[in-house]
Image (spheres, helix red, strand yellow):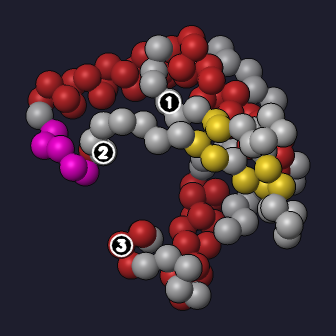
Amino acid sequence: MDVVRMGKNVNELITGEIELLSYLTEKCNIITQKVKRNKFGNAITILNDKTPVTVLEWLDGDTLDNIKITKTIAFEIGTMIGKMHNDLKNLKIKNRYNYDESLLSSMIEEMREALKQRSFNEKQTP
């Protein structure tokens, strides 16, 4: 899948996302996935077809769709989102994806196309 690049270098966009994950872990005390570096020590690997990719480690625990959401859990999630919002308001990362309606719509269209091409199954797409 080739997500909208917003006229920017995709490696710079990926680097911005990696910086965001690091910032959330280091400054906001929010557990995030960490990038696994390749055998050359790089966070981004360029495949033979020139596609840049990263590998992220798995996080232990259940996903929200596998647990019962209680008032306590909802409160904890809301508190974490509020803290994250406050911690991020002064963060300046030069190149980042802008997760707006346009990008998300493009992502959904790409997923639908991938479904048509049988790259995904019904359960993996919106």
Q: Does the segment drawn in magenta span residue 66?
A: yes
Q: Amino acid at mark 3?
A: Lys
Q: Position of residue 75 (x, y in %)?
A: 22, 24
Say which element carries label 2: loop
Task: Name the residue furthest top.
Answer: 27
Distance of label 2 from label 3 (alpha carbons) = 15 Å
- Position of 27 with respect to 30 (left or right) is right
| Sequence-first disc among 1 and 3 | 1
Q: Amino acid at mark 1?
A: Thr
The quadrant in which the N terminus is found is bottom right
Q: Residue at x 72, y 37 (%)?
A: 37
The residue that disc 3 covers is 123
Viewer-nearest residue: 102 or 45: 45
Task: Please tell me the numbered disc located at residue 32.
Answer: 1
Q: Position of residue 50 (x, y in %)?
A: 87, 63
User: From what the image shows, is residue 65 above or below residue 89?
Assistant: below
Q: Residue at x 62, y 24 (%)?
A: 22
User: Which stretch is magenta?
Assistant: 65-69
Whether residue 7 is visible here, answered yes or no, is yes
Q: Estimate how packed mark 2 is, as few (under 14), some (14 to 19) or many (20 or more) residues with alpha carbons within 10 Å.
A: few
| Sequence-first disc among 2 and 3 | 2
The residue that disc 2 covers is 63
Are discs 1 and 2 less than 8 Å apart at CB?
no
Say which element carries label 1: loop
The quadrant in which the C terminus is found is bottom left
- Position of 48 with respect to 118 (left or right) is right
Q: Position of residue 42 (x, y in %)?
A: 81, 38
Distance of label 1 from label 3 (alpha carbons) = 24 Å
Viewer-nearest residue: 21 or 78: 21
Q: Does the segment drawn in magenta span residue 119?
A: no
Q: Estimate how packed mark 1 is, as few (under 14), some (14 to 19) or many (20 or more) residues with alpha carbons within 10 Å.
A: some
